[in-house]
Image (spheres, rainbow, N blue to C red):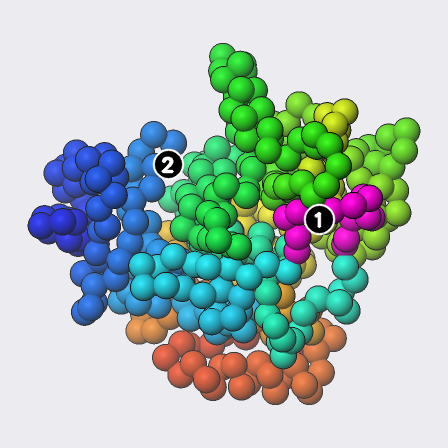
Amino acid sequence: MRIFTIGDRVIEESSPELRAFLPQAYDQRLRPMCICKEPPAPMYIAQVEGQYLIKRMPLSGRDHDPACPSYAPPYELSGLGPLIGNAIQIDANGKADLKLDFSLTKRGPRAAPRAPAESSEPSILSEPRKLSLRAMLHYLWEAGELTEWRATWAGRRGWGRVRTSLLNAAAQMTARGASLGEMLFVPEVFHSEDKDGIAARRAATLKGVQATGSGPRKLLMIVAEVKEFSAARKGQKIVLRHMPFPLMIEEGACRRLATRYETVLELWRSSEAFHLIIIATFGISAAGIAAVEEVALMVVNENWLPFEDIHELRLLEKLSHLKRKSVKGLRFNLPRDAPIVSVTLPEQNPAPVAMFIMPATAGEDYEQALSDMIEARPEITPWVWRVAEGEIPRLP
């Protein structure tokens, strides 16, 4: 049970007083403080589907007690570690200032959209460290707490909740001197009774990226669910859910995208239950056509949890029925040959458990890197599934 101080009040999470007070605290921009540890950890109030919820600040999960629901595992176990203090800088209020490795401005003739090869992903030693487009998507997912799961949430996480979580997370971030929320477009769930309102809000958001003449113009980031890829007279169309028009992508760029994300696309096509998430920078031509500049993809399961391969999927399936919380680790900028934590069980006693999956192709360098990672976090209990040795070991 969490206990917060908000202004001059001390309130338990389950208290009716808290639910009644949160709208007022939200309007007054009061900051809740979680008193699970000393010093207390700052949090913020978010509006999610008409409800007011208290959320942890970006990267503050380690500042909470492991028994606190707001606790999150050490970011050094995932691809987030190399980015902290470089691509991601947290200020005293918990706001994250981001350095981006992609442009949000369109200059000159349209270049082919970028879908970099695996080998061009930044390495753990690369300088300067910036967020690739894929890493930006991973960070939004992580900060939006969409990497977390427990069985009691089944059936309660749809696109509406995903969208709100992403926008709330973006509101806690800045990039290039502006709020990330002003740079991000996430389509609303379509409701026929509000179609005119949805269309008006969408038009207002997209107005700033409509080409009006020559010279540089602004681009937006979009995070959305892909419905399908289909042929166009020239190039391809990426059809998105809850969007009345597609994103256009050149044929060559689409082929490169299919090569770069071959595994992601294969996993997505293997089950109707899975969702394909796109993050892209895009602009709108003077003719009103939306066209992709840069793009990255991510596959998630029916609970909107990302996974990299069939082994992670099987582990997530086994954990999905547990009432205790699990937290999915993400790769961010790291290449596939670098170990990361697959899942963390933060509520496990007597210590949180970090779950690693060692691929059958792993060599001595991978084994050594994993051993070094485990030794550096002695407060975490390791669990390792060596795929080459057989089936999933017994869960903790």
| Disc sitting over residue 336 in the figure | none
Please tell me which residue is depicted at 56% across the width and 37% down the height of the picture.
185
Q: Quadrant of residue 223?
A: top right
The residue indicated by pointer 1 is 295
Q: x%, y% of residue 290?
A: 72, 32
SS class of the residue under badge 2? strand
Q: Amino acid at mark 2?
A: Val
- Front position in the image: 394 or 276: 276
- Front position in the image: 116 or 276: 116
Q: x%, y% of residue 237?
A: 79, 33
Q: Quadrant of residue 325?
A: bottom left
Magenta span covers which residues? 102-115
Question: Is 267 left, or right, of 340 in this rendering?
Answer: right
Q: Amino acid at mark 1?
A: Val
Decide: is 49 above or below 384: above
Please tell me which residue is depicted at 18% across the width and 53% down the height of the picture.
4
The residue indicated by pointer 2 is 48
- Distance from the alpha carbon under mark 2 to that under mark 1: 28 Å
